[in-house]
Every structure is written in C-alpha cells, then in structure tokens.
C-alpha cells in the first residue's frame, strides 16, 4: 500500500513538474503580444518559473486566455485573481481583455494549483482617448504608403464627421486599391475598418479623392472623382514645334546627344538622348 501511495504521489509531482501553460490571444508580429501569435493555443509558453511572461506593449486593447496547450482546457476572465491590476474585463467568450492608454509592461502569471490568472501592469489599465484619425493606405490613393504616423494625412472634423480630400493623385492603373483609418498615429489602437476598405478606380488619370469617417458608427466612405484621364492629359500636352542643338541650329528629334526641345506653349526643355 505504501508503495502504491508513493507511486501515486510521485506521478502527481512528475505531472505537475512537467505541466506547461501558454498564453493565447490576439497577438501579431507587429506588437510582440502573445509572442507575436494570433490565438495559438500552444504557441506562447509561460516561463516555468512561476508560469509568467512579460510583454512591452504600446497603447491598445488586448485579449487572451491561458491554456494547457489545447483548447480543451483553458482559463480566462472568470479565473482572474484579485491580485491583478484593476481594469480587466470580459472581452467576450470569457477572454481577459485590458486596454492601455499609454505604453506599459504587462505581466501575465498563472497559478496552476488554484487555476488563477494574475495580470499586472506598470501603468493602470484604462480607456483610450483617441485624439486623431489618420488616413492610411496604398500610396496611389493616399499619397503615402501605409503610414499611420503621417500627420499630413490626418482627418479634420467638419460637419459632424472626420474628412480629408486628396487632390492631384496620378493613378497609373485601373483596379482595386486599399485604405483604412488609424487612431492616434499607430496601428492596433483602433482601426476602421478592422480589415481594409476597397476603392475601385475605373480608369487611369488624375483624381480627387474625398474620404469620410464617423468613428461613433464606424461608417466610412471614399469618393473618387476623375479630374483628367490619361487620354485627355496626352491630348492636352504641348506639342514639339522644334528641336535644336546647343548653338541653335535645327536638328532632327532622332539626332543623338544633348538637344533643346521647343514646345507649342512656348516652353523649352533640354534632353540628353542616345
């Protein structure tokens, strides 16, 4: 009987000794949260010493659970310890959710015996204060390639909605282009939409594009107006009325070397051609 009891205790200790726990949540390769993994049940291992892990996070909202490496056994909001930093809530589905208004180091710990999660932060959890909305997307339709920190693409609050107009955008190809709106000059604080919005450009040309956003309802729109299409631009281009060498003698446009082109609108241009 003693041998059986000792064997059972030994098996229990061995099982506990080698138990591993993971944090699974809405991480991404841009923020390092959850080891950069999105809802991977056995991806971000909690350190063996105290089953804890720390993350340096920028402002934003984050969600997670603790698992044993499977979704069969997982622990979330209803397993939070009172030792946690106040401010965590049920993010839906029993996920632990917290929001950072400023950058902080957040530590997640798991007590495998009590099955309790403790979440602490170097800064208090609290709601975000959104101070700006910025247009971000493909350079052809926004002027700048996917940059939420570009202050020149900040929207202005006019007539009850945020808006910005981009003019003189030369779009070389018809097709589907993508954009979105980012809060506080950063990704992951809040983005509308959560994916990318589509804008259809039906013909090459020079465009004016008006963007509108209502963050309260998360409604948005983009209206593209063709100002000059590619054919019209070509037709309106000044014609070459003369080609000269550097001493003012008329020459053929096909003559190699440095040439002076004179246009129908009175302008001139030097070109080096071979």
Image (cartoon, rainbow, N blue to C red):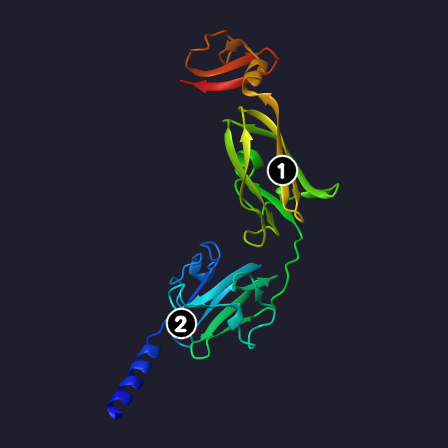
Coordinates of residue 233 in the picture (x, y in percent) = 57, 18
Q: Is residue 64 visible?
A: yes
Which mark is in front, 2 or 1?
A: 1
Residue 74's quadrant in the figure? bottom left
* Quadrant of the rendering where the C terminus is positioned: top left
Question: SS at mark 1?
Answer: strand
Rendered residue at 31%/86% (across/down): 9
Question: SS at mark 2?
Answer: loop
Residue furthest to the front in view is: 1
Residue 137 vertical placement versus 249 (above, below): below
Of the image marks 2 and 1, the number of the one nearer the N terminus = 2
The label on residue 47 is 2
Q: Residues within 10 Å of mark 2 (few under 14, many from 20)?
A: some
Rendered residue at 48%/15% (across/down): 259
Q: Is residue 58 visible?
A: no
Residue 168 vertical placement versus 258 (above, below): below
Q: Is residue 11 left or right of residue 162?
A: left
Coordinates of residue 146 in the picture (x, y in percent) = 53, 43
* Quadrant of the rendering where the N terminus is positioned: bottom left
Residue 253 vertical placement versus 15 (above, below): above
Q: Is residue 55 left or right of residue 129?
A: left
Q: Residues within 10 Å of mark 1 (few under 14, many from 20)?
A: some
Coordinates of residue 219 in the picture (x, y in percent) = 64, 43
> Which residue bears the numbered disc 1?
221
Rendered residue at 48%/70% (across/down): 108
């Amino acid at each position: 009987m003693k041998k059986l009891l000792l064997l059972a205790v030994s098996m229990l200790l061995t099982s506990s000794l080698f138990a591993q726990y993971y944090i699974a949540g809405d991480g991404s390769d841009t923020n390092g949260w959850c080891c950069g993994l999105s809802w991977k049940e056995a991806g971000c291992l909690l350190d063996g010493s105290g089953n804890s892990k720390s993350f340096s996070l920028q402002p934003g909202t984050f969600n997670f659970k603790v698992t044993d490496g499977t979704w069969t056994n997982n622990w979330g909001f209803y397993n939070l310890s009172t030792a946690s930093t106040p401010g965590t809530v049920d993010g839906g589905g029993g996920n632990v959710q917290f929001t950072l208004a400023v950058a902080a180091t957040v530590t997640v710990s798991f007590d495998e015996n009590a099955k309790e999660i403790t979440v602490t932060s170097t800064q208090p959890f609290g709601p975000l204060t959104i101070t700006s909305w910025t247009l971000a997307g493909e350079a052809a339709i926004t002027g700048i390639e996917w940059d939420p920190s570009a202050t020149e693409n900040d929207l202005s609050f006019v007539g009850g909605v945020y808006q910005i107009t981009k003019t003189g955008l030369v779009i070389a190809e018809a097709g589907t282009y993508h954009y979105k709106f980012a809060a506080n000059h950063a990704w992951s604080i809040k983005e509308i939409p959560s994916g990318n919005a589509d804008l259809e450009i039906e013909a090459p040309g020079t465009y004016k594009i008006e963007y509108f956003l209502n963050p309260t309802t998360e409604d948005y729109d983009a209206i593209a107006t063709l100002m000059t299409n590619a054919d019209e631009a070509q037709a309106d281009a000044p014609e070459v009325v003369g080609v000269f060498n550097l001493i003012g003698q008329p020459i053929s446009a096909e003559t190699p070397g440095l040439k002076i082109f004179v246009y129908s609108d009175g302008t001139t241009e030097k070109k080096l051609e071979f």
